[in-house]
Amino acid sequence: MASGYSAKEEDGHHSGALGPAGGAAVRSRKPDNTAFKQQRLPAWQPILTAGTVLPAFFIIGLLFIPIGIGLYVTSNNIRELQIDYTGTESSSPCFACSQNYSWNMTTPCVCSVSFSLDQPFESNVFMYYGLSNFYQNHRRYVKSRDDSQLNGNLNSLKEPSKECEPYRTNDGKPIAPCGAIANSLFNDTLALYYNDPNGTETQIQLVKRGIAWWTDKHVKFRNPVGDDSNLTAIFQGTAKPVNWQKPVYELDSDPENNGFINEDLIVWMRTAALPTFRKLYRIIEKNSSTSPTLPRGNYTLKITYNYPVRSFEGRKRMILSTISWMGGKNPFLGIAYITVGSICFFLGVVLLIIHHKYGSRSSSADLTH
Amino acid sequence: MGSLEVWSLIKQGWRRKPEQEDKVRRLISNLPYEDLRRKYQPNRQYANNSIKTTKYTVWSFIPMNLFEQFHRFANVYFVVIAMLNFVPIVNAFEPGVALIPICVILILTAIKDAWEDFRRYQADKQLNNMPCSIYSRKEKDFVSKCWKDVRVGDFVKVVCNEVIPADILLLHSSDPNGVCHIETANLDGETNLKQRQIVRGFAAPDGSFQPEYFSSIIYCEKPSNNLNRFKGYLDKPDKKKIGFGKENLLLRGCTVRNTDEAAGIVVYAGHETKAMLNNKGPRYKRSKLERKVNTDVLFCVALLFIMCLIGALGYFIWLETFPDIPPFVPPDSNNNYISPALSGFYMFFTMVILLQVLIPISLYVSIELIKVGQIFFITNDIDLYDEETDSRIQCRALNITEDLGQIKYIFSDKTGTLTENKMVFRRCSVMGIEYCHRENALRLGAQCETISDDEDIVFQKPKVPSRLQYRQKKGISSLRRSQSARTHMGARYQSEVFTITNEVAFSSPLETDVAPDRRLLRVTCDEKTQIQEWCRVSHCNGSASFMDFFLALAICNTVVVSTAMLPRQRVHSSTLKTGGRLQSLLKRMGSLSHIVNSFQSIPEKSSKSRSSLKDVKEEEAEDYSDSGSNNPSRRNSSASHHSEEERGTVSDPNGLCYEAESPDEAALVYAAKAYGFTLLARAPDRVTVRLPQGAVLSFEVLDTLAFDSTRKRMSVVVRHPITREVVIYTKGADSAIMELLDCHENQAEENKRKKIASKTQRHLDLYASAGLRTLCIAKKVLSEQAYDDWASIRQEAESTIDNREELLMETAVHLETNLTLLGATGIEDRLQDDVPATIAALREAGIQVWVLTGDKNETAVNIAYSCRLFNQGDMVFTLNTDSREQCESILDCTLGEVRRYTAPSQSWSFQSIVGAVMPTESTGPTFGLVIEGRTLSMVFEAHLQMKLLELARHCRSVLCCRVTPLQKSAVVKLVRNKLKVMTLSIGDGANDVNMIQTADIGIGISGQEGMQAVMASDFAITHFKHLKKLLLVHGHWCYSRLAKMVIYFFYKNVMYVNLLFWYQFYCGFSGTAMIDYWLMIFFNLFFTSTPPIMFGIMDRDISAETLLGLPELYKTGQNSEFYKRATFWIVMLDAFYQSLVCFFIPYWTYQGSDIDIFTFGTPMNTVSLFTILLHLAIEIKSWTAIHWGFMVGSVLLYFIVALIFSAICINCNPPSNPYWIMENQMADPVFYLVCIITTVVALLPRYIIRVLQGTLALSPLVQARKLDRLSTEARDQQIKNWKSQRSPSEVPTNLVSPVDSFSNSFEQSFYNSSLEREMPDMQWDSNEETQNTFSKGHRRSISTMTV
C-alpha cells in the first residue's frame, strides 16, 4: 500500500517527458531550511525528575485530602434508610405475596412492613424502589424498545420497531409501549404511613411528578398527537404490554402524567447501569421549614405486591434518602480522595528524599566522574 | 487429461497467431498497409506504444481497489466482524454502525490509491502525447504524431536530444559512419554515450532513407527485460539473412546524442519495450518492527479469544444461575428461549464484535501514515542534500524507515562508496621503471584545498541564471542536453531535463589535469627524436615502448570524445568551428580550469616530421589537420591563457571531454593527454590520436574486445597507420595480464622481459599497498595472417545467434596471449569526505562495518587503514588460503588466539555478543580480519561459516577483498541469517546489487557507476557520510517514534476495550456496551487517533546534535529497547491496570445509585480519553506547538462532539439514548471529581516510574536528554567529557582530515618505506608492556596466518 510514490519515477523514460517545457523547471531540489522541515521547532522538553515533579505531588496531596474529607462528611450527612420487602423469608410480612407471584394477578396482594426512624430526615426525602440482581443492562433487554414510538411517532405506534420482538404485537395489534423493558415495568405500589405515637396513621404525601429527567419528560417522551386529544382514542388499536394490567393510557389519572409521559414509565425506561439499582419512585417534599420532612418515629410501608422477582432471585427494597449536591449516600469517593491524596503526599516525601540523595546526579556534574 | 487438451485447443483458437510466435517475433513494415483498418494490419497483435501504468479505470476502481485491499488480512477480519453484526442473534452494535470504522479505513486507503493512480494516469497521458515523427507513405515524409500512435512496424525518426519513443531497430543514421549515439541514463543510469550501429547493409550511400523500399521481414526474439540481450535477423526479399543484435537497437527512454537524426523500424512498442519491462514496481519490504507488530497482533488475537471465551462461559453460567427465566432475558422473536449453552456459543461471537477493537484496526493505516510523514522529514533533511548533484536522499522503500535505527552490521562496497570513484592518475611504471609523479602528487595535495574553497564559492554563486540566459540566447533545441555526468543521477528523479549543471563536477581539474613526471616526460621527449626512425622501420623495437605505452593508454578504451561546450556533440569539423559564439561559456570553462598546467607546454616538434606524417594521414584525419596545425601556436600561448580565450578557439584540447564507461579509463586518457598523446576522436572503426609532436595519427580499429569480469581485461585491435601492423593493445588487472606474457625465443630478450615483468610486479605491489588501483598495459603485434585467421573465426562467432557471448569471449581469450608488457599504472581512488569520521561514529554506535570489495588485498587493506576501518593498533588477521584443511586450521588458530586475549575479560565478549551493555573497550586489543574471496568460498564450501562468524564477531572490522558480487550477498546472507541481526548494505555499482537486495536495508550511492545500485536500493544517498545522519539521527528517531507509537497503540486499544470487558461482569456477560456506539467508534477514529500519529511523526526524544555527538545512543535501537517483548507485556499490564482503575472508580462511585447505562459510561469514556491522552503526554519528549495543538484539539473535539451529539440526538440512535446525557453529566460535580481522581490514579504508576528513571538517569537516553537542555557550548563540552569517560581509547586524539592523513601516509609510504613493506607498521603504546608482547605475537601470527 505504501507504494506508488516512487512508481512513476522508475519509469525511466519519464524524465524526458517534461523536456521542452523545461525552462520553468529549473528549481533546486534543496529542501527548505525551515524549522518545521528540519525538525527544529522550538520545543518544551520536560524531563520528569523528582525535583520537577515534587510540587505536583504535594499539590495533589494537599488538594485531594480536603476534597476527600469534604466529600466524606457530605456523604455521612446524608440520611438513608433501606427496607427490603422481597419476602423470601417466611417471617417476612410479604412472604405470602411473594409466593404466589404472577404477572397477571387479578387480585392485588397487599402487605405492610413497619419500620422506625431513629433520626428525622430533615430536607426533601427521595423515595426509591431498589431491585437487586435485575439485569436491566442485558444487551437484548436494553435494545428491546422503540424510542420513536415513545417519542409519539404515530407510525411507530402502529408499526413498532423490530427491536421490540417478541413484545411487538399481541394478537395482531401493536403493543404500546412495545418491548421487553416496558413489558417488565415495575408495578408495585408503595405507600408510606406515619404512625403517630398517638396511634393514628397518616399517609405521607408522595409527589409523583418531577422524578424523571426534565428532558426525558418534555422532549424525549411524548404522547402521540392525534385528531383527538383523548389518549384513549389515540391509543385505539394498540395492545397493552402482555405483563401489564392496565393499558398505557390508564397509568395515571393526571393527563400530564399519563401515557408515554408517565414518569414512572420514563424512569423505568431509563435502564439501570448495574444489576443492583434503585429508581426514584416518589419525592416527599419538605412542607415547612420548622418540622422535619420525616420526623423520628414509626412508619408503615404498605406494598401492593405485584412484581415477581423470584425468577431471578432478586430482591426488592424501598429506600428513603435525603440527597446532597453529590447525590445519594456513597462514602467511596471521599475515602478515595483521602487515600489518593495521602499516597501522593507520601510519594512526594519519598521523592523529596530521592531528590536529595540522587538529585545531584541529575545535574550535569555526574557526567564528568 | 482430456480437459487439458481441450483447454489448450481453446487457447490456441483464441490466439490470433499460431504457436511458433512464442519463440520469435515476426514483423514487417506497416507502410503498405497504411490506410487499412486495424484488422488488416500485419503487426496488429503486438502491443502499441500507448502505455498504461494505472491499475484502475474509472469503472473498475471500486471493485478492483476493494479486491486489493482485501488482500490484507486485517481488512478481511474487520469486514467479517462487521458482517457478523448483521447476524441478528449475535449482533452487538447496530449493524450499520459497526461498518463505519472499516468503511472509513477502506475509504481512506482508496482515496490514497486513487490519488496515486491518478498521478500515474497523468504521467502516462503526458508520455503518450509526446511528439514523435512517424513515416507516412502518403506524405512521403515523416509526419509529427504522438508516442501513442507508434505501432510495431512503423518507421520512426528521432533527432538529436530527442527521447526515443519505442524500441527501434536502427536502419538509418545521419552519421556517415552509420552510428548513432544514445544515452541510456534513463534506463540504467550510465551517463556515458553508447554507440549503436545501423543494421549491416542499410547504410545508404547518399545518406537518404527511403522506408517505402523496406521489404524485409524482421525476425527477432520475444520481448524480454534483458537490456543487454537482443538478437534477430532480417529476411531480405532476396532470401539473404542479415543478423542484428543489441548494438542495432535504440531503446525506448534513451536519448539520442551527437547524431543529427536517426531512423528505424519499431520492433517493440509500449509495454513490450525493454524499458517498460524493466520497470518493476516499488519494493515491498517488511520491517523488523512490523514483523514484531504482527506477532503482537497475534497475541492480541489470543487475548481477544480468551476474553471472548470468558464472556461466553460467563453468559452460560450466568444463565444457569436463574431458577426461572427472568424478565430481562427476552425470548427471541418467535418467543422461544434458546438453551444457555447455545446462547453462550452465540455470545462468543457477540463478544468478538464487542471487543474487536482490541485488534487495532487503525494501526496499519496509522503506521503507514507515520512512515509517509517520517519519509517526508527524511527527504527534507537539508544535511542529506547534495548541492553538487542537486539531489536529496531518495526513499525508495517506504516502509522500512524504522529499520534504519536497528542496524548492527553494515556491509559496504569500497569503490565509489568509501571512495569517490573519481580516479586520479598518480603513478606509472613503464618498462620496469617507476615514475612517481611527484609533481602531480604535490599538485593534488595543494589542489584539494583550493578546490574545496573554490567549490564552495562556485556552488553559492547563482549559477543557474547564467546558464539559463545562455540557453535562451542560444535557443537551440540541440542544447537541451547539457547535464553533467553526475548531475544526471539526481536529475532523472526529478522528471525534468534541466537541472543545475555544474561544470566543476564534469571536468574537475583535479581529475583531468595530470602533471607529467619530469623524468618520464624527458624519456618520452627523447623518444620523440626516434620517431622518424620508428616511422621508417616497420619493426617495433623496445625503445618505442614508451610511445606504445601512451598510445595504449589513449586508445585502448571505449572513451567517447565530445567537446565541453557542447557536451555530447561529437567532435566534428563543423562543430569545431562553430565555437565563436560560445565565448562566454568558454570563459567560464577557462576560469574553472584555472590551474594552468605548465608542463603541458611540450617542446615544439619540428615541422619536418609533421609533414612527413601528413602523407600517411587518413582522409578523416584531414579534418583535424587544422586543429593540428593550430596546436603549436596554442601551446605557445598556453601560458597566457586569456589570449587564447579571446580568440575563442574551440580546438583547445582542454575543451575535449572524455566520457568513459569507467572513471579509470578517463583518468588514463587524461594521463596520456598530459604527455601529449591526446585522444581526439573515436568512431567505431577509427580512433584518432594527436601525438606530442602535433601529428595526428588515425588508427583503424579492427576490433574491440570489450571488458568483462571473467577476463578482467579489454583489448583493442588496431592497424597502425604508419607501420600498417596489426597491433593489439590490452589493459587489465595485473593478475590477468601477467599470466599472458609471452616467452621470447631469444634468451637475452626473455631475461630482459622477465626482469621488466618482475620489476613491474614489484611496482604493482607497491601501488596496491598504497591504495592505488593498478592496471597493466600490454601489447602484441599480430601477423597479417594470424589476424586474418582470427578475424574469420571472430566473424563466425559474431554471426551466430545462439551462445554468441560465449563464443565471442572464447575468441577474445584466444587472441589475448603472448603479450608484451608495456607498463603499469596506479590510479588513486580518493576517499570521500568524512569517511573516517563516519566510520568511527558508526562503530561507536555499535555497528560493525564490513567492507566487501573486489579490489586486491593490499589496496583494500590500505584503504581500510586510511578510512580508519582498521586502526594502527589493531591486530589484523589475514585469511588467505587455497586449501580447505589449511583454511579450517587457520580459522581455529586465529579463533584460539582471539579467545586468548578476550578470555580474561569474559564479560566483554559476552556483552559484545549480547550487545546489551557498552563493552568496556580498554581490556584488550581490537582485532581486524581480512579475508580473501577464495578463502571465503572455501569457508562456504567447508561449512566453516559459524567459525568465521565467531571470529568475525570478535573483530572490530572485517574486510573481504577480491569477492564476487555473489559472494558479497552470500556474506550478507550469512550474517543476517545466522546472527539474526539487522544488516545494511551500501554500494554504488552493479556489482553491489546482489548485496543491496539481500540486506535488510539496501542503500545505493548515486555516484558514477550508474543507477543499478540505486534502482535496487531502499534508500539512495549521494555520499557515504550521509549514512551517519541517516542512521544515527533519522534511524534513531524513526525507530523510537514508531516503536513507541506502536506500543502506545496496543496499549490504547487494550485499555479502552477492557473497560467494556469489565462491564460484562456486571451485565451478565450479555455484551452490552455502556458507551454510546458512536462515541465509541469516534473515540478510536477521531478523538485518539491523531495524537499518536503526530507523536510517531514528530516526537524528538533527543536532538540531532546530541545524537550525532553521542553515537552510542544508537545502541538503544539496535537492541530494540523501545519495543521488546517485555515492553509489550508491561504495557499490557499497564493497560489492564489503567482500565481497571478507569472502570472501578466510577463503578464504586455510582454503585447502587439510580444511574443509567449510558450516564454510567460517559465518565468512563471521558476518563479513558484523559488517561489515554495523558499517557501519551508522559511519553512525548518534546512539546512543540503542534503537539499542544493536537492534544488540546483532541480533548476539545471530544467534548464538542459529545455535547452536540447528545444535544441533537433525541432518538436517533436506538437503543442508546444519548440525549442530554453529556450535558447532564457535565452539570454534575461528581463527574469532574471522578474524572480527576481516576486519571490521577490511572497514571500514577507510569508517572512514578518515569520520574524515577528521570531522576536516577540510569539510561544513556535520559542523560542525553538532559544534555539537550544545556546550551550548545555546555552540551559540546559535556559530550566530550562523556566520551572520554566512556571509552578513553575510542576517541582519536587528533582527527586529521581524511585527505591530509591519506595523502600524508601515502607520500610517506612512497618516499620513506622500503618495497618489502607490506602493511603499515603496527604500533602499540610503548608504555604498555603487555601490548608489546601482543605486538610480537601479532607479527608472528600474521606471518603464520598468511599462507
Image (cartoon, rainbow, N blue to C red):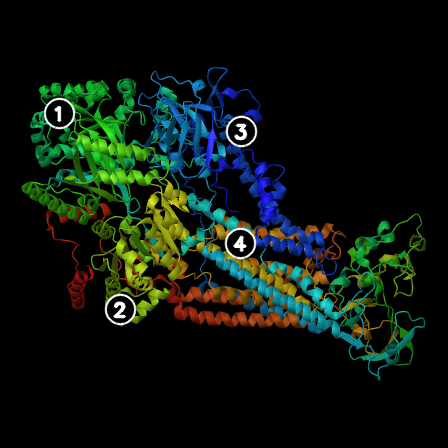
Residue B44, numbered circle: 3
Chain of the residue on which disc 4 is drawn: B
Residue B14, numbered circle: none
Which-is-in-front pick, marks 3 and 4? 3
Which-is-in-front pick, marks 2 and 1? 1
**Secondary structure at numbered mark 1:** loop
Chain of the residue on which disc 3 is drawn: B
**Secondary structure at numbered mark 2:** helix
Nearest the camera: B1030 or B269?
B269
The answer to which of marks 2 and 1 sits earlier in the sequence is 1
Of the residues shown, which amino acid type is indicated by label 2?
Answer: Arg
Residue wearing tag 4: B1092
Query: Is residue B371 in view?
Result: yes
Q: CA distance from mark 3 to mark 4?
A: 55 Å
Nearest the camera: B742 or B480?
B742
Q: Determine crowd level at label 3: few under 14, some 14-19, many 20+ residues with C-alpha closer than 10 A.
A: some
Residue at the (73%, 67%) spot, across then down: B342
Residue wearing tag 1: B693
Which-is-in-front pick, marks 1 and 3? 3
Which-is-in-front pick, marks 3 and 2? 3
- Quadrant in which the C terminus of chain B appears: bottom left
Residue at mark 2 shares a chain with residue at mark 1: yes
